[in-house]
Amino acid sequence: MYTPIKDGIEKTVQSVIYSQTLPPDHLSIVAHCFWEIKTQVPLAEDFLYHILPDACINILFNQLELTITAITGLHTTSKVLNLGKKFHYSGIQLLPGVWRGNPHEIINGFVDQPYTGTLPLIKTNRALAQANDDKKRQVLSTLLQHLMNEGIIKANHVTAVILKNIESIHSVADMADIVGISSRHLQRVLKKTTGFSPHDFLKVVRVQHSFQQEQDYTCHYSDQSHFIHSFRQMTGYTPTKYCKKFDV
């Protein structure tokens, strides 16, 4: 199972709560988690949220302004978002490659405008605002099931096989061999379903796996300096500085 790390919250930050819950089993083929981040009390300073690339698409809901909701995603570099002194967001983190909706709806950055698309996101956000904690999972599950029924979200066999076998993959050729297709076909499939080239997809997933302390993913790099360079290119920090600064 692909378990991307949560985005960066500085260790010095107080009064910000982040939580995750797992989706129902029958939806785990398309979603990693349901998540929530909010302030307990208004903060003294603006909160800067360090978002990491993970090849996932998120469906985001602003619980303080119910018309503001969006489909969001990053490519290969991190982004710092200023969420202000008071905020409350909920969301669904989709697994890589499962989003089959309009790619032009995906926003790379801060979301501050009302949603104008055709998906029932504002309706879902309003239902979330009225639900208690026990019911929020049900509301998000209902949306996921609807999107699956409409073909907007669909399990991706290619990315699922790659993520399951990531420890055995050292190159794009390995990716193609494990999936059982040609490198050229892999290029087309990944670009269409994730927006990534095979090389960029592998780079992002490798760095994500490097956060799992129980395994040494530096073996996927030619040497330690190569790993540090790739990590810093994606996150803006060396591995040591990142772990010192953020709650990992």
Image: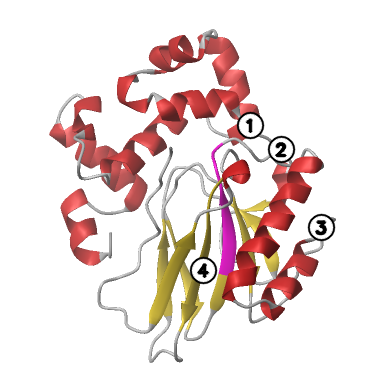
Q: Quadrant of the N terminus?
A: top left
Q: Does residue 166 appear anywhere in the picture?
A: yes
Q: Amino acid at mark 4?
A: Glu
Mark 4 vs mark 3: which is more N-terminal?
4
Q: Quadrant of residue 248?
A: bottom left
Q: Residue 142: horizontal and vertical position, in percent?
A: 73, 56
Q: CA distance from mark 2 to mark 4?
A: 24 Å
Q: Residue 209: horizontal and vertical position, in percent?
A: 32, 39
Q: Which mark is residue 100?
A: 2
Q: Amino acid at mark 2?
A: Arg
Quick check: 38 left or right of 128?
A: left
Give the extent of the magenta segment: 90-96
Taking 196 as reference, is 82 above or below it? below
Q: Secondary structure at mark 1?
A: helix
Mark 3 vs mark 2: which is more N-terminal?
2
Q: Secondary structure at mark 2?
A: loop
Q: Which mark is residue 36?
A: 4
Q: CA distance from mark 4 to mark 3?
A: 23 Å
Mark 2, residues whose alpha carbon is within 10 Å: few (<14), some, or many (≥20)? some
* Residue drawn at x 73%, y 48% as measured from the top left: 145
Q: Which mark is residue 240?
A: none
Q: Nearer the viewer, residue 180 or 243?
A: 180
The residue at which mark 3 appears reads as 117
Q: Nearer the viewer, residue 21 or 205?
A: 21
The residue at which mark 1 appears reads as 193
